[in-house]
Image (spheres, grey):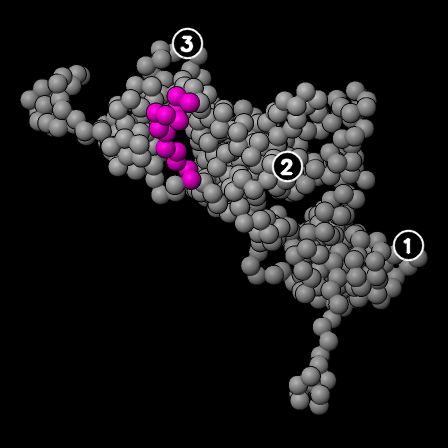
Amino acid sequence: MGLFDFLFGKKKQDPSFTLGVVNFFKGDDNSSDLMVVGFVKGSIKVGDEIVVTNMSCVTKTPVKTTVLSLMVPEGELQEASDTMVMARVQDGAKLDIYKGTVLHSENASDEQRYNAYIAALGIAFEDEQECKLTKEDCERLAASDISEIWQLYYKAHAEEAKQFEAKQVLLNYKRRELYKLIREKLFLLDDVYVVYSVETDEPYLFSHASEDEKGTLSVTMPMARLIPSSYIHNLKESFGKNEIFDFKRIENGPDKEGIRNFIRDLCIYDGIRGIQYCGEKTTILAEQLVDLPRYKGMDEKEIPVMNPNVIKWLYLARQLGKLNTKDKKTLSKVYLYQFYEALKIAKFIAPMRLHGYDQLLEENPQTDVEPNIPFDLAMQPGKTKEWTLKVYTDWKRLRKHYGEDCKALIVTLDEQLAFHDVVINPGDHPMAAATITEELYNEVK
């Protein structure tokens, strides 16, 4: 103990408290004060200064007000601890308080606030409303609020739904109802965070493998995980314990198309089948989120080169990291087998430089053909052969490195490996690329 503490005593920090709002209404006197009902964790007193936090929209500048009165069924009291209470909040009607809002002391931790928020949603929407959202609920709740409500409802009814068909029908109905609201609100956000893989520097593919009675492994459809920006500091603590994850912010932009376009590109180019929003139980398929291109009936030459299966299986294998467990080694074999299966039918884009092309256009401005023009393909030193040919799985990745005007040749591995090694998607992050040699390809093939 220091001399100052010895002489004057060390000031004790006041204990923290939280109150998750379950319901609210205006008082009979038509003032701007608001009556809020919720469960107090800790002790709250009349006259306490409180911070008002909506977990779906955490602001940098805390909104503060004061507790004017407290009431329980037995009557008014000056202090309440660990109980349901009705509190009169000064000017609460002006503070955007709704079901799930957390009123708390300034020293309440992120974890305490989040727990109070989830408890309030559970009481309000699972216990009291049976997941029936009012018109006002639908207007005021954010996409993340609705995702949390769905996950609480699913957790409470999933086991029962496995036993009774009527319960399964109801569960599916609630899923469709709440997912519709989440979709509408998700695309109106200013931004969202995406969980990335440190290994590939690409969105982490959340997928589970399971083994049936015969020992056959099956893999669930890979999903990207989106996190509201208001959650990111809280979730970084839990995700941060695992060094395989990173987080990147996706801006929605002034036209509110950024998140939609990001999800669409993941589905088209990376083989991701949908998203998980906030948690793994809020899983929305790509077809329910964005319009995907349809190529059925089109001439094969008109279909742009894309290889979502190549990317999907490669990234699933890469994000395993070190193969230091039996399960990881088994999964790696499954993923790489599927990766090489996808390579057999894949077409790739090889960047090329044409010599004399500009002069040809000047002399023949109407020509659509490039006869006998010498060209170079993009190469780097080889691994088993003198040169390695650079190829890309899609135009988006190629143009990222070579620009919009880059010319290219469409190739397959079969026709190239006899002459060169091939590297797929070379770039800034080696683990997002793959080098294929003729010997390895033929061995797997």
Give percent across and percent down for residue 226: 55, 40
139 displayed left or right of 84: left
Q: Mark 2 vs mark 1: give the one in front.
A: 2
Identified at 48% across, 37% down, the residue is 318
Identified at 35% across, 43% down, the residue is 428
Magenta residues, start to end: 431-443
Identified at 56% across, 31% down, the residue is 331
Q: Are marks 3 and 2 in contact (CB under 8 Å)?
A: no
Disc 1: CA contacts within 10 A as few (<14), some (14-19) or many (>=20): few
Q: Residue furthest right?
A: 74
- The type of residue carrying mark 3 is Gly
Q: Secondary structure at mark 3?
A: loop
Q: Which residue is mark 3?
A: 297
Whichever of labels 2 and 1 marks the residue nearer the N terminus, that label is: 1
Q: Which residue is mark 1?
A: 73
Q: Mark 3 vs mark 2: give the one in front.
A: 2
Judge whether residue 443 can be spotted in this image: yes
